[in-house]
Amino acid sequence: MKPSIDAGKLRDTLQVLELKESPAGTWAWQNVRNARGQVELSTKSSLFSSVGIGARGAEIILRRQPLTLHNALLWGKQHLFLTSILPEGRLHLRVQAALVELSECQADMDEGGGAKFPGILAEKYLKWEQPVPYSTNAITYVLVTPKAIQLQRGGLVGVDGTNYEVQLAHVLDPWKNEYEIMRREDL
């Protein structure tokens, strides 16, 4: 038998977020309700992306409520990207999350600009090339987006004011999409 959760430890104020489109073409995380929980930071990384480097992890205990991996949590000013939700006893949920920074993104920059949406930029790797007579960096990241966001391979996506080419799309996850994006920069 698992020990019961002490309700007095649910002291952290959280906002349960849902991605909504308003106005047309602009997506944003919006508060749908407040919740009380217990947030414990981890020293381990949370692998929220299957092709990118993870972020600092957190474990949250909440009272049972409607919650899926389509949601996110806001803890103070910290965005929590949900990676796992499991029942904990009869009355609570144990939620695993990654502490991430949101980026302001815009799709289809090569076509004059499309949908605006929040994304999460994750480190992938850095390539260095030496074509004659100068050096360039091929900067590659992973952009994790909510499932509602669809980007075109070969198109451009703006991330925090910088355009990147969408190279690969990983769209089989039912909760999110992941795009490998790249730009070249002269050294």
Image (cartoon, grey):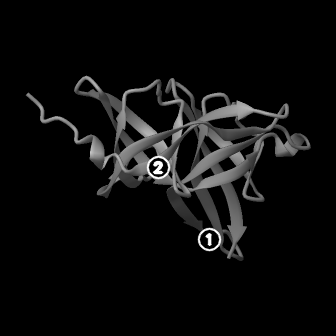
Against 104, is 169 above or below?
above
Determine whether the residue tagged by mark 1 lies in a helix, strand or loop: loop
Q: Residue furthest right?
A: 112
Q: Which of the two residues, 77 or 6, is positioned nearer the viewer here? A: 6
Against 32, is 142 above or below?
below
| x and y percentages locating residue 175 in the rendered image | 52, 28
Mark 1: few/some/many CA within 10 Å (<14, 14-19, 20+): few
| x and y percentages locating residue 108 in the rendered image | 81, 40
What residue appears at the point 70 percent right and 61 percent down from the top-left corner? 184
| x and y percentages locating residue 11 in the rendered image | 37, 50
Residue at numbered disc 2: 13
Q: In the image, is 117 to the left or to the right of 70? A: right
Q: Identity of the amino acid at label 2?
A: Thr
Between the residue at mark 2 and the residue at mark 1, the CA separation in whole angstroms equals 51 Å
- Image quarter hosting the C terminus: bottom right
Asked whether residue 130 is in view, the answer is yes
Residue at numbered disc 1: 130
Q: In the image, is 11 to the left or to the right of 68? A: left
| x and y percentages locating residue 146 in the rendered image | 61, 35
Against 59, is 147 above or below?
above
What residue appears at the point 49 percent right and 46 percent down from the top-left corner? 14
